[in-house]
Image (spheres, helix red, strand yellow):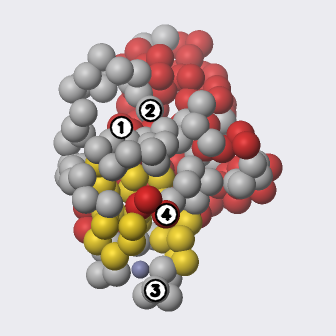
Amino acid sequence: MSVPGVPTDDDPELELPCGETVDVREFDLNTSEIDCECGEAHGVVYDTDPLTRFIPEQMAHTLEETVKPRETDHTFGTLHAVGMLADEVPQTVASTDASEIGEVGFNYVWVSDFTAREVHVLLVQLLVDLMDHAVDQVGDDSIKSAFAERLDGLDVEEFVDEYRTQRSFDGPDDTAV
Ligand SMILES: [Zn+2]
């Protein structure tokens, strides 16, 4: 399985945008951020993360319903969202295909130059834009107005802070579904 903009590599040693190297076998699915040797914190996302790690279920559902990924029959998910993020800011995301590495619990892992919170903000912005386009194309007025109502005056930064507070990011709900 490959995703445009996401280079694949079966080496467990992942070279990060900052120049440091990490062994992805040390990650478990609750690792959403690493404190790097370079002194910065880097956000970590897995292909097995549900979209609801970043956005409410209702939004995730709307995306699944309205966005059809071009390259596959799969429903839209975290894999596609991060693929898009990697396209937007390629220099800031290192990724590896861990499917050949063994029992790590994920196939792809992305480590960003941004913190976990910054990644969350970027992803929400990207997903909101994507939904905006998708909903427009659907042409269903009830979906449109529900969406507009929901996003009216949405402050992405505030939304992310609230979302991250509401959800325990080390909780069992944040592991793969
Ligand atoms: Zn680093």
* First of labels 2, 3 by sequence position: 3
Asked which quadrant contains residue 80, the reply is: top left
Identity, as a three-letter code, of the amino acid under mark 3? Glu
Q: Using the numbered discs, state the Cα–Cα distance from disc 4 to disc 2 in whole angstroms.
A: 24 Å
Across and down, in percent, residue 31 comes to 58, 59
Q: Using the numbered discs, state the Cα–Cα distance from disc 4 to disc 1 in whole angstroms.
A: 24 Å
**Which residue is at 25% across, 59% downward?**
11
The answer to whether mark 1 is within 8 Å of ligand 1 is no
* First of labels 4, 1 by sequence position: 4
In the displayed structure, does residue 1 sit left or right of residue 18? left
Q: Using the numbered discs, state the Cα–Cα distance from disc 1 to disc 3 in whole angstroms.
A: 29 Å
| Ligand 1 location (quadrant) | bottom left
Which element is circle 2 on? Answer: loop
**Which residue is at 53% across, 71% downward?**
34
Across and down, in percent, residue 13 comes to 31, 67
Which element is circle 1 on? Answer: helix
Across and down, in percent, residue 115 comes to 52, 70
Q: Using the numbered discs, state the Cα–Cα distance from disc 3 to disc 4 in whole angstroms.
A: 14 Å
Q: Which residue is mark 3?
A: 37
For the residues bearing labels 2 and 3, Cβ distance under 8 angstroms: no
The crowding category of the residue bearing disc 1, from other C-alpha atoms within 10 Å (few below 14, some 14 to 19, many at least 20), is: some
The answer to whether mark 3 is within 8 Å of ligand 1 is yes
Across and down, in percent, residue 19 comes to 29, 81
Q: Which residue is mark 4?
A: 26
Q: Which residue is mark 2?
A: 77
- Of discs 4 and 2, which sits in the foreground? 4
